[in-house]
Image: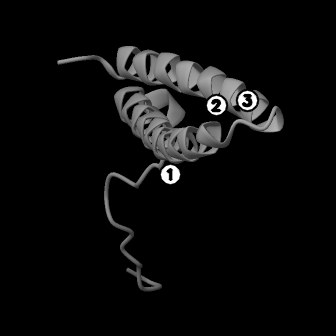
Amino acid sequence: MQDPVTAIDTSFDRWTQLSDAFEQHLAHMKQGDERARVEALRLARELDALTRRISRELDASKQQTAQASPQSQPSQPSQPSQPFLPTRPGI
């Protein structure tokens, strides 16, 4: 099983590749290449899906980190060891 950081690194590497390819297809579109549009649209959809996945992985990684380190959790006020018992005057 991959640790969350490795999974995010792998996803980010793929995102970088897709982003670079998308940029190249945009440049081809500006030069009038009609076929580049279809591929740019496909890459845009894949980039969007991967961006969402990376966001979910980052959120999950943050939650796991917060659960693993109790210092990062807000402390609870201490409870008295014995319940408060009211006393009656004169006793």
Q: Which quadrant is the N terminus positioned in?
A: top left
Q: Which quadrant is the C terminus positioned in?
A: bottom left
Which residue, given by chain and number where applicable, does mark 1 sit on?
Answer: 77
The amino acid type of the residue labelled 3 equals: His
Which residue, given by chain and number where applicable, does mark 2 sit on?
Answer: 22
Nearer the camera: disc 3 or disc 1? 3
Q: Nearer the viewer, residue 41 or 62?
A: 41
Q: Which mark is residue 28?
A: 3
Q: What kind of element bears circle 1? A: loop
Q: Nearer the viewer, residue 74 or 24?
A: 24
Nearer the camera: disc 2 or disc 1? 2
Q: Earlier in the sequence, mark 3 or mark 1?
A: 3
- Residue 48 x %, y %: 54, 46
- Residue 25 x %, y %: 67, 30
The amino acid type of the residue labelled 2 equals: Phe
Tell me the distance, in whole angstroms, between the alpha carbons under discs 3 and 2. Answer: 10 Å
Lateral position of residue 43 relative to residue 23, left or right? left
Q: Residue at x 58, y 44 (%)?
A: 44
Q: Residue at x 46, y 46 (%)?
A: 49
To which quarter of the image does residue 82 belong? bottom left
